[in-house]
Amino acid sequence: CFGFEMNQLIKKENPAPSDNISYFLRGYNYLSDQTSRHHVHPISVHIPNGLLPVSVIFIVLAMLFHFNPLAQAAFYNMRVVLMAMPIVLVSGYTDWKNRYKGKLSYRFVIKMICGSVVLLSSLVLVIWQIIDPAVMEGTSMTRWGFLSLCFLMLAAAVMAGYQGGKLVFKGK
């Protein structure tokens, strides 16, 4: 019900200036247009897709060689991924609505699920490491669960990127 009403409000051609919600909608439409026009999603998605493989490599090396500085670097990279994910998801949603007219295909469903997995995994991993800073040490009983979640997150990011590439480079 609410989504239908909101869609009808957004489609107003020239809302009356006295209508308070029209200022919100005009601002929303402007930001939505600028987000798509300036390619915020393709740009912002490179942050997690660049940092996640590095983080996972650092985590594996930190566990293998018991080298804490790599674990710390991975932790900071993971925090940057966590901070970037809301921008990635909101700009992806905006592009889907603007460029693809909100058409829900299996590729978009996969991308939405994978994006959610990356966001939730990075949140859990950051909180996990805050609660248990020694999680990547050889003596930690939970290190394999931590590493498994890292690989799940990396696989979700790769799958989302692959599906995005299929959308952008159709038939290539």
Image (cartoon, grey):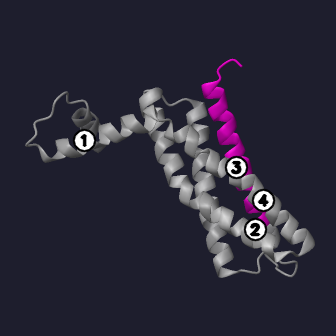
Q: Which mark is residue 25?
A: 1
| Whole-percent x, y for residue 43 in the image | 57, 41
Q: Secondary structure at mark 1?
A: helix
Q: Secondary structure at mark 4?
A: helix
Question: Relative to 84, is 97 above or below?
Answer: above
Please, what is the three-letter code of the amino acid marked with disc 3?
Gly
Q: Looking at the image, is mark 3 or mark 4 nearer the viewer?
A: 3
Q: Going from the N terminus, do you reach mark 4 or mark 2 first?
A: 4
| Whole-percent x, y for residue 103 in the image | 47, 28
Of 45 and 2, nearer the camera is 45
Q: CA distance from mark 1 to mark 2?
A: 43 Å
Q: Going from the N terminus, do you reach mark 3 or mark 4 first?
A: 3
Residue extent of the magenta highlight = 146-172
* Disc 2 residue crowd, few under 14, some 14–19, many 20+, Cα 10 Å: many
Please, what is the three-letter code of the amino acid marked with disc 2?
Phe
Q: CA distance from mark 4 to mark 1?
A: 41 Å
Residue shown at the point (65%, 41%) measured from the top left: 160
Q: Which residue is mark 4?
A: 56
* Disc 3 residue crowd, few under 14, some 14–19, many 20+, Cα 10 Å: few
Please, what is the three-letter code of the amino acid marked with disc 4?
Val
Of 36 and 140, nearer the camera is 36
Quadrant occupied by the N terminus? top left
Magenta-span inclusion, residue 103: no
Q: Which residue is mark 2?
A: 146
| Whole-percent x, y for residue 58 in the image | 81, 63
Of 116 and 171, nearer the camera is 171
